[in-house]
Image (cartoon, rainbow, N blue to C red):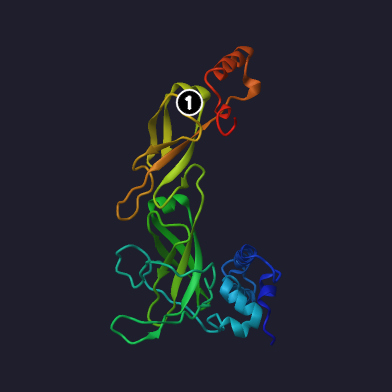
Amino acid sequence: MAEKDYYDVLGVPRGASQEDIRNAYRKLARELHPDVNKASDAQEKFAQVQAAYDVLGEPEKRAQYDRFGKAGSGGFGGGEGAHYSWSNVGGRGGGGSADFDLDDLGSMFDAFFGGQGTASGTRAARGRTRERARPSANAELDVSFMTMARGGTERVPLRRGGKAKTIEVSIPKAVADGAKLRVAGGKGDPDLILTIRVGKHPVFRRAGSLDLELDLPLTIAEAALGNEVAVPTLGGLVDVTIPAGTRSGKRLRLRGRGLTDDKGAAGDLYAVVQIVPPPAEALSDADREAVERLGALGDAPRTGSPWA
């Protein structure tokens, strides 16, 4: 049987962007996952999609495939009969046979369920002879912002030999978006490398390794006259004194209120002032006069350089 073109398998043109390829794969993976799709050929199609993304999802492999076809892509994929088995996975310090560590290996949501591992070359162990590195399967794991901030566990569904299985993966506190978590397999089994994707938060955003920031809306009066306002933090509301004459864009620093990692190091939280004027239709004539008098005080920033 003729080998299917990987672009056709994912339903994308050959000139598709990496983002288009990734989106197509994730859509098909959801539709064809054997736990969801009970069609007789769902598992076979799912494996084809995995194999296609294993190559097209990585620019270097894709370039080889575009030039030489499947023969030039290195024969990626575990092939028929490939499988994973894991025992007592997850939990910190639980004595299980799997372990976790941050890794630099890159990949997307490929080889997640069907055992399409990638050959990873050779490595030299200290004091030992060179040996071929363990094949690895790659997957993408979405975690919420708060799970990233507080740490926790995520349940990861897998399929082994036609049977569904779930493992628990321990998420370190303050893990970076794009970080790699390696879950070591048992003897003869491939490792599972998870690329962490951290979701967005409606209030907080990351401003560094452990620092956070948020927008702090203030009224004109609060910014001009100063006030004490409640600022949300990961640990709850904290009262912050706003100095009189605070400008829009000023960053107010709350020390130690950012992220905390597993070693106890803590970052800072920055509240970025955003002065919010009242809606024009809500202003009475007296309000307008008051605003005009306020506007007449001092020089506007644009009167100086570089506006002059």
Element class at badge 1: helix
Instruction: Please tell me which residue is depicted at 42% across the width and 34% down the height of the picture.
Output: 231
Q: Is residue 54 visible?
A: no
The image shows residue 158 at horizontal and vertical percentages of 49, 70
52 versus 80 height, above or below: above
Name which residue lies at 56% across and 25% down: 300
> Could you say where residue 175 lies in the image, as x and y percent from the top left?
41, 57
Tally of numbered discs = 1
Which residue is found at the position 45% from the left and 82% from the top? 121
Query: Would you say 209 lies left or right of 27 here?
Result: left
Residue 39 or 86: which is nearer the viewer? Answer: 86
Callout 1 amino acid: Ala
Q: Quadrant of residue 126?
A: bottom left
Check disc 1 and report the residue beneath it: 223
Q: Quadrant of the C terminus?
A: top right
**Residue nearest the observer in this picture, 121 or 189:** 121
For this view, does 163 lie left or right of residue 87?
right
Screen quadrant of the N terminus: bottom right
Percent coordinates x, y for residue 5 in the rendering: 68, 78
Q: Quadrant of residue 122?
A: bottom left
Location of residue 292 with respect to 89 vertically, above or below: above
Residue in the foreground of this view, choosing between 205 and 237:
205
Q: Is residue 231 left or right of residue 36?
A: left
Q: Is residue 132 above or below residue 137?
A: below
Density class for disc 1 (Cα within 10 Å; few <14, some 14-19, many ≥20) is many
